Image: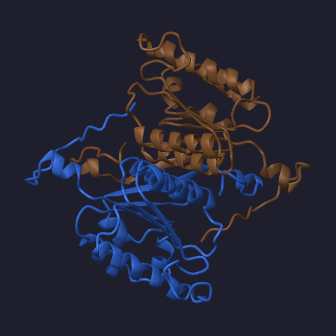
Chain colours: A blue, B brown
């Protein structure tokens, strides 16, 4: 049963508490699906800490991750009614971002992705949330829709104590370099190899 | 953005729906922490499907994963009050299993682990839950406290439609062989390398 004991203490003039409370940039990458699932699991813990949580899904389909969406929004609703845990927002690119006037009509996915990032950058500068989950965000970076260097610069300079978790395959090297924690989910065995399609509750 | 399209369709006489609804044995292994986090993320989806969920934590410390525990139990409480989602149970070995008369006094961890597995095997035979999360269960297997072959036999022969997710490092080969889905979480970069200890909301 693993212990949280660091192997070396850095000589950076910070106290253990200062290092401990450092806001983290976390990247979940690799070919397997646990990337997003683990990010939403992290959101569970954040909710219990009373964190203000915002999820931004860079996906086309509105039904993608609907299980996690419903469950986390249920926790957010519980917070609204009882004060337990923290507030939760869930935004998806799917049929247009919830804050966008272009909702439903936005067919240019590159432009939609850039709109998403602009809003996230604005919120980060304004310190609106404690935890940002940028789900499948590596794809618009990989495809050149959003400039990686701009993202890394904005994330590296983010004020206050905001955690950011980014998921998706093929995380760009500049993002990996900037991250505090990078986990790669690799396939050992997958039922799709045996011809099985995704199933309710497991895949979505 | 990934699509759930199988690469080959097996010639096993089953319909797509039959294969799709196959109960899964999932193993999250590897050296990184996303293992449990992703398992609890799966539980989020299951909750949204109305599944009956039971978590069994094979850990010594009662405060381990308390964030996920509180959040998932909050969802279970929401189900009790409103019917939304599904019921959630959370059991931990920590200070003795909740169902055990030996509670609080059990200092033999090997015996406690065996008690846990016996209860799980009983529930699986009785089809009491839809999703079982056996958190950190690879350790009592690895240390020989619980017989791997007995576990594999019981899981392989489990009746009905029960999903089982097992987490922990060093999953035994017999368990990996029996699993439908195995994900390995590997370290690319971790803040503990830079002397940082775990922090509230991120590590627990």
Q: Say if residue A127 shows up in the picture.
A: yes
- Residue furthest front in the image: A81
Residue drawn at x 42%, y 47% as measured from the top left: A84
Residue drawn at x 46%, y 60% as measured from the top left: A88
B174 to the left or right of B142: right
Task: Quarter of the image for the C terminus of chain A: give it.
Answer: bottom right
Task: Quarter of the image for the N terminus of chain A: give it.
Answer: top left
Residue drawn at x 51%, y 74% as measured from the top left: A139
Residue drawn at x 27%, y 59% as measured from the top left: A23
Estimate the x, y position of residue B203 in percent, counting from the top left. 35, 45
Picture layout, residue B87 above or below residue A85: above
Q: Quadrant of residue B152?
A: top right
Picture layout, residue B187 above or below residue A26: above
Estimate the x, y position of residue A14 in percent, counting from the top left. 11, 52
- Residue furthest right in the image: B13
User: Is residue A84 or residue A129 the one in the foreground?
Assistant: A84
Estimate the x, y position of residue A9 in percent, counting from the top left. 16, 45
Q: How many marks?
A: 0
Q: Quadrant of residue A155?
A: bottom left
Q: Say if residue A38 shows up in the picture.
A: no
């Amino acid at each position: 049963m693993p212990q949280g004991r660091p192997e070396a203490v850095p000589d950076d003039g910070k106290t253990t508490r200062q290092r401990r409370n450092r806001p983290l940039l976390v990247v979940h990458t690799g070919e397997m699906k646990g990337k997003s699932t683990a990010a939403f699991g992290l959101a569970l813990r954040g909710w219990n800490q009373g964190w203000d949580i915002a999820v931004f899904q860079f996906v086309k389909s509105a039904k993608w991750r609907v299980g996690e969406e419903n469950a986390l929004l249920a926790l957010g609703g519980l917070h609204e009614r009882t004060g337990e845990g923290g507030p939760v927002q869930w935004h998806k690119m799917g049929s247009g971002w919830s804050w966008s006037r272009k909702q439903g009509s936005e067919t240019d996915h590159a432009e939609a992705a850039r709109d998403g990032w602009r809003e996230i950058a604005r919120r980060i500068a304004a310190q609106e949330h404690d935890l940002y989950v940028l789900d499948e965000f590596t794809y618009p970076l990989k495809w050149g829709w959003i400039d990686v260097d701009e993202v890394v610069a904005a994330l590296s300079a983010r004020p206050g104590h905001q955690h950011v978790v980014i998921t998706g395959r093929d995380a760009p090297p500049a993002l990996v370099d900037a991250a505090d924690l990078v986990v790669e989910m690799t396939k050992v065995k997958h039922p799709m190899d045996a011809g099985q399609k995704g199933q309710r509750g497991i895949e979505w």
